[in-house]
Amino acid sequence: MNESKQKKLVLKLCVTALMAALVVVTSWAQVKVPAGPLGDQRFHLGNVMCALSGILLGPGWGGLASGLGSLLYDLTDPGRIAELVITFVTKGLYGVVSGLVFWKGFKGRYTYPALTVSTLCAAVAYIAIYLGKNVVYNGLLMQGLTLPAAVTAMTLKIPSSLFNGVVAVVFAPIIGLALYKALKAAHLDRLLA
């Protein structure tokens, strides 16, 4: 491997680790509200960094950063440890979807509309998967609820899911544009995704 490829790989690893750490920290910035048999609602900022991971690093590395950061967050909460593999996959998809839409759909053009649509697609995909997981895994398998009861219990998770998605759609594009300008000024914009 030549020096340029090694430098790019080391930079991607470092930024992936940084984004994973930011996902953990912003997931801790939360408000928990009891939500019935499927657990607490969490209003948090972690989804902002999950979307940014995909935007900055692309779908592969970005998915790894968002999934790994969310998995590490689950390790800090005893009530969530049993779901850490599921969290790795579902939150990893947040970064994958935002990265795919941004880098494949918008060709990596850092514009506010491109960042907003990329984040919105990731938020919608994640919310659908998360709510489905709450019905099937948490409701049917773990709690033994009937399907109507699991669906009813899942509706208690909708407010926090929508809030977290909207927060990501509002803030990820703003932060993404600011980061892009800083990376471009430092001549690092071409080394990331």
Image: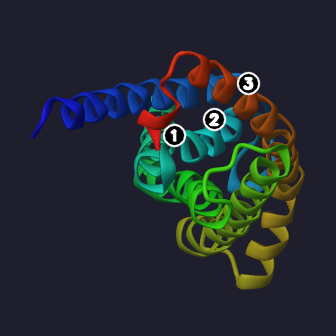
Circle 1 sits on which residue? Answer: 70
Quarter where residue 144 is shown: bottom right
Quarter where residue 118 is shown: bottom right
- Marks 2/3 in contact by CB < 8 Å: the verdict is no
Q: Position of residue 91 (x, y in %)?
A: 55, 51
Residue 172's disc is none
The front one of 121 and 179 is: 179
- How dense is the environment of label 3, judged by Cα within 10 Å: few (below 14), some, or many (20 and up)? few
The correct choice, above or below, for 5 with respect to 89 in the image is above
* Color theme of the render: rainbow
Taking the spot 75% from the left edge, 48% from the top edge, the residue there is 115
Q: Earlier in the sequence, mark 1 or mark 2?
A: 2
**Residue 33 at least partly seen:** no
Q: Amino acid at mark 3?
A: Ala
Q: Amino acid at mark 2?
A: Met
Circle 2 sits on which residue? Answer: 49
Q: CA distance from mark 2 to mark 3?
A: 14 Å
Say which element carries label 1.
helix
Residue 178's disc is 3
